[in-house]
Amino acid sequence: MDSGRLVLVAEAGYPVSIKGVLIRDDRVLLVHNERDEWELPGGRIEPGETPEETVAREITEETGLPVEVAEILDSWMYHIAVASKNVFIVTYGCTTASTAAPVLSHEHSRVAEFAEQDVPGLPMPDGYKRSIATWFERLRVSATAG
């Protein structure tokens, strides 16, 4: 997905949220939101930013961890029932060399890292679960090919 298509989605009246799947030590980093759900760190694209810049900035702001953005994983329209609105979600696979513990920002109630087998049972949108599974699989394939 290119930045031009994201602009068209935003101009159509849908907010765009860029999220990152960060896996390290076989655990995915998640944040807990006000809807009592786990979600991927990330947020709104700012004017002049690329989606990759957005996700890197947002993950660092929300967790204190610097990241490298590797590749796009998925995109979909998510309906937030409690807010009665649609948000266009784009997810990217990310990596980090940092071994520091994630820091909780003021935007969330918790931050945690989960093993792959724990993700299906977590309260979170299916699109996030799909992106997490995709990134785990791509990292496994990359590790065996390299």
Image: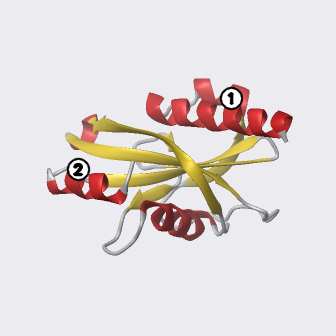
Q: Which residue is drawn at 21% across and 43% down?
A: 85
Picture coordinates of residue 38, whole percent (x, y)? 52, 41
Mark 1 element type:
helix
Which residue in the protein does label 1 denote? 118
Residue 8 shown left or right of residue 44 in the figure? left
Residue 129 shown left or right of residue 97 in the figure? left
- In the depicted structure, whether residue 59 falls above or below residue 26: below
Give the image quarter of residue 67: bottom right
Q: Residue at x 46, y 41 (%)?
A: 36
In the foreground, 23 or 52: 52
In the foreground, 106 or 102: 102
Picture coordinates of residue 37, whole percent (x, y)? 47, 39
Q: Which residue appears farthest toward the left when viewing the image?
A: 12
The residues tagged by marks 1 and 2 sit, at their Cα atoms, a distance apart of 33 Å
Inspect this view and state whether residue 125 appears. Answer: no
Which residue in the protein does label 2 denote? 9
Q: Which residue appears farthest toward the bottom when viewing the image?
A: 48
Query: Are discs 1 and 2 less than 8 Å apart at CB?
Result: no
Q: Residues within 10 Å of mark 1 (few under 14, many from 20)?
A: few
Picture coordinates of residue 44, whole percent (x, y)? 36, 61
Residue 86 shown left or right of residue 97 in the figure? left
The residue type indicated by label 2 comes to Val
Of callouts 1 and 2, the N-terminal one: 2
- In the depicted structure, whether residue 8 falls above or below residue 73: below
Quarter containing the C terminus: top right
Q: Which residue appears farthest toward the front when viewing the image?
A: 145
Mark 2 element type:
helix
- In the depicted structure, whether residue 121 falls above or below residue 30: above
